[in-house]
Amino acid sequence: MKQQDNWHLTEVVEHELGRGDPFAAAIRGTRMPMVITNPRLADNPIVFANKAFQNLTGYERDEIVGRNCRFLQGPETDPDSVLQIRQAIAAGEDVQVDVLNYRKDGSIFWNALFMSPVRNAAGEIEYFFASQLDVTDRVEAQASVEKQKALVEREVSLRTAALQAALEAKTLLLHEVDHRVKNNLTMIGSLLRLQSKSLGDPVLAATLNSMLERVDALATVHRRLYQSDDISRFDIGPLVETMTRDILGSAGREDIRAEIDVASVLVPSRHASAIGLIVNEAITNAIKHGFANNRSGTLKVAVSSENGTARIVVADDGPGMTTQARSGLGRTLITRLSRQIEGETVWLSAEPGTKVVISFPVDD
């Protein structure tokens, strides 16, 4: 009798959906829950529900037919999902939405609803065809994944905040160390300058002044380090520009015109002191030998980086390299310090003058 009732349900659809129609048989027999509603009747009621739909919802045919689909809604059903369905029906359009529904026994299930209008030859909507699929497992799995994701993101956020706080504390500590080192170097320089004034030996005074210049160079490096926000990397471009102007100023050589062209080049902070001393020696040697005897001229200083290699160039337009410049302590220091930063330094003729080119690897 129930099978005959199910057949009879399909016969209310006034299309070629009779007993012998394979499409009607497919709707009745499929395991996919399906209903047909009639928008020409008041409140667009269900006029057909297959056995799979009855099994899904727990309702018998007589409890389904004649009712609007909203009877499956409950307290936790999302109003936005319901609004999507209503708007699609009003517009005569397809709709696909996951909606929380309630069975007859009060249990809930997530319903993947797909509804589409059925039009006659004149294009008028005569029925709405709706299929359902229980996707509770998928939705709950997705909710579980989202919950786990939220927990992971929270833990990551907390860990990141802790690491950031630790980094800030480390940065503050290192900046304080650099600041104190800079102050100590400045104090040492001041004491040595006072001592140099009491020396009667010009050679000894000159040697002491050379050491003072190196102490000043290190103090400049540490001043830049504690002013930097990044404790792991150091920008040598501004350092070279500052050192060039400071050294010329300390030498009192206003007759030397400086042409400075520096780019921003980041290097590991551990190389900052070595690079600072190299630049100090190169510029100091240029002043001493390229502009000796108060000779005026132009000092060119440049910093650039290309294809993973940084270049510092110091060039003067003086008479060229002297024997003293070729074998002095400054050149020895530059050579040794260049090895520390895995680079090399070459001395070239600038025609006129001398060009010192310091090359070393960097991470672009």
Image (cartoon, rainbow, N blue to C red):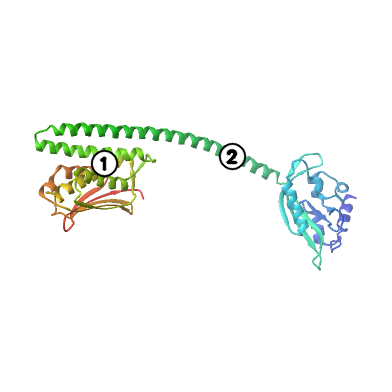
- Disc 1 secondary structure class: helix
Look at 14% across and 34% down and name the residue there: 197
Q: Which residue is mark 2?
A: 150
Q: Describe residue 179's horizontal placement relative to residue 327 as left or right.
A: right
Q: Residue 144: x, y in percent?
A: 63, 40
Who comes first in sequence, dot 1 or dot 2? 2
Which mark, residue 274?
1
Q: CA distance from mark 1 to mark 2?
A: 47 Å
Q: Name the spot of residue 301 as percent of width and height, x first.
A: 25, 51
Give the answer, above or below, for where 254 lies relative to 352.
Answer: above
> At label 1, which amino acid type do we have?
Ala
Instruction: Tell me where residue 203 sits by quadrant.
Output: top left
Q: Nearer the viewer, residue 209 or 233?
A: 209
Q: Would you say residue 212 is visible in this rendering? A: yes
Return the residue nearer the eye: 272 or 251: 251
**Viewer can see residue 111:** no
Q: Please tell me which residue lies in front, 308 or 202.
A: 202
Which quadrant of the figure has residue 137? top right
Drawn side of residue 269 relative to residue 150, left or right: left
Outermost bottom residue: 122
Foreground label between 1 and 2: 1
Q: How many marks?
A: 2
Residue at horizontal 33 percent and vertical 34 percent from the top: 179
Image spot of residue 341 (x, y percent): 27, 44
Residue at (13, 47) in percent of width and height: 325
Residue 101 placement: quadrant = top right
Give the structural element (helix, strand or loop) at label 2. Answer: helix
- Which three-letter amino acid code belongs to the residue tagged 2? Ala
**Residue 52: percent from left, percent from top:** 79, 49
